Amino acid sequence: MRLPRLAFSLLAAGAALQAAAAPDAAAYFRDPALHDAAMAPDGRHVGMLLTNESGRTMVGVMAAQSQKLAPAFSYSNADVVGASWINSNRLLLTVANVNNSGNPVPKGIIALDRDGSGYAEVAPLVPHSERFAQPGRHLFSGSTDSDGWLRSSLGAHDIFVTSVYENGARVLSRLDTRGGNMTLLFAPFERLSGDADSGRNYTLDRLVDEKGRLSVALIQRDGRHLLQQQDGGGDWLPLANFAPGAADAIAPLLHLNGKLYVAARNGQDTTGIYRFDPAQRKLGAEPLISIPGNDAEGQFIVGGGRILGFRTSAGPRTTIWYDAALRAAQQQVDAALPNTVNTLLPAARAELPYLLLSAESYREPASYYLYHSVSGKLVRIGDSLPGIDPKTAPERIAGSVKLAGGMDMPVWLSVPAARAGKTLPLVLLLGEKAWQRAQPESWNAAESFLTAQGFAVLQLDPRGTYGYGARYFEAGWQQWGKGLQDDLAAAVKWAAAQGVADPERVCAAGTGFGGYAAVLATALQPDMFKCALSWSPQVDPAMLQQREDRCDCQPPLHTPLGQIGGASQPALLDPQRKYARPVLLAYGKDDGAALARYAPQLAQLLKAGNAQSDVLAYEQPGRQTALAANRIDFWNKAAAFLARQIGGPLQP
């Protein structure tokens, strides 16, 4: 087998891209050469998810000392779409046939040793839906614990799995990948016989302690959220009881060495991380972690039976290291790589002085390095998207817009490096979910592609975005056709005031909620928004009230989706709504039953309103997978659509 060649420097393709006036979307939306990487628990090897020369995602294992890469596993007719370390010698892989070519294998979970031996089929895979234009990155989970399930409690060949039973119950289990024995870890009210609790009753969060017990559970029961702890005798004891998304809500994050760590507001506008005393059933007086102006979103990093750090996902992306050696390493790495966000990915029980890290920014996709903590040597071991020259990356203007009530809305304007002082056509790029924060420190393929085409790109965190405190979050509830649309207009006016964007040439764009808001903007504000790009949009807000899944923002909110937006919000399928501006609508035929049913109806309304509107319906041969060919085709056609509606690409 020939391994994919990892790039240690920019490929010659980068020069060609730099010279081109309008680069092809393939450079930005192809499957990554290196999807993700993670160190083995002992720190001697790095597992890597790679795209090989036949286009399949495979697993390679690199020795940390020699940096020699060897194949561990690949299929000719399937892809490894997820991986994790079971122990320092054994891997757990999630396999799926992404493009359905050849004789497809069933989706499932397998285990094998890092040299490719010891193959064992572990479990079938529960299917899940992916939008056709989803990014193609697959994940390799690290060996440290960051999700509250402490793997240090597991046997040498054990893993945690969530099993789905015929009655609909979803139960956390401990599975021996060698012998096949399974131990069920029941949360309160979970059962395998009869009708499973569903709809209004289910488990929201679980914590497994260092002894391997399912020790804490957050459950929904008859419209209330109950936080409970299991005692030594197997009985579940109540800790807290609150309404979903209420000010007194508590979310469990970690239960380690008898200490329970939670996220809570505790009377403040923003959430903090607190110790919770089960005996007193109360929070500590002061937060252990707080981030001024932001909710304390993130995860604890646990290794060797202790807390190593806390990785934030709100505000500036950083890691608060409690481990002195990791704190020193972070400082040294940041000094060596000052222009990127550098995320250390340590081993759980390192036996060698090597640290894996990823480095990225809005200007450059993720690259991976090995750092020797004794010598300080930094070795680049691979790039996610080699060939994209940072010299062609956008420039960024950050600012804020004052909203009613004195709230500040964060905004980011990206422009081509070669704009030469021109005012540019503007694309307003909206988030997939109404509450989802933009990630201005991360590389964004759509942002980079569009600026390379010669467009200015505007991103914002409008009211209703989670992460800036309860007041800002709740200000956007039920405001999708009112206050939020005002925010979009205010952001565009801010961009125009920077002397960069042409307010007469503006197009809104997005997927999910962003696709919904973009189409709605052309109907409610046609003088400002001359067109829209909408791929796999949310069509009918009323459906949120019919769904029992919750806002997947960081606890403690677990806010019902219907509370954020619902039947009272404008529906795109309103026959009285006029769509006079052209819209490019795109969706996958397997995006989901609701979208497949409603998208053709929306397409008819759009075309009736403007003959220049167009619809792209993509096949997904692998089902529940996102294909690079679809992404590339869509974005090339999107660029052509934008050029027709608001202006052509940047000329050299």
Image (tube, helix red, strand yellow):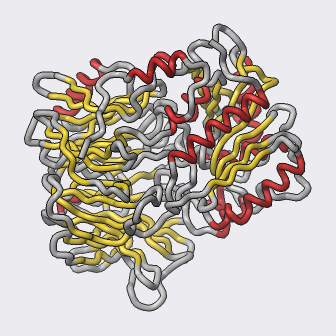
Q: Quadrant of residue 252?
A: bottom left
Q: Quadrant of residue 38?
A: top left
Left or right: residue 195 compared with residue 110: right
Task: Name which residue lies at 49% across and 68% down.
Answer: 225
Establish if 362 lies above or below 638. above
Q: Position of residue 525 (x, y in %)?
A: 84, 38
Left or right: residue 397 compared with residue 585: left
Left or right: residue 136 compared with residue 283: right
Q: Nearer the viewer, residue 505 or 634?
A: 634
Establish if 253 lies above or below 355. below
Check the image and name the residue furthest to the bottom: 194
Q: Nearer the viewer, residue 598 or 501?
A: 598
Establish if 451 lies above or below 268. above
Task: Name which residue lies at 86% across and 46% down.
Answer: 579
Q: Is residue 239 visible?
A: no
Q: Nearer the viewer, residue 295 or 51?
A: 51
Q: Is residue 644 visible?
A: yes
Task: Name which residue lies at 72% across and 23% down.
Answer: 648
Task: Name which residue lies at 43% across and 79% down.
Answer: 169
Question: Which image quarter is the C terminus in?
Answer: top right
Q: Position of residue 73 (x, y in %)?
A: 24, 54
Q: Position of residue 158 (x, y in %)?
A: 19, 66
Q: Quadrant of residue 549?
A: bottom right
Left or right: residue 148 compared with residue 71: right
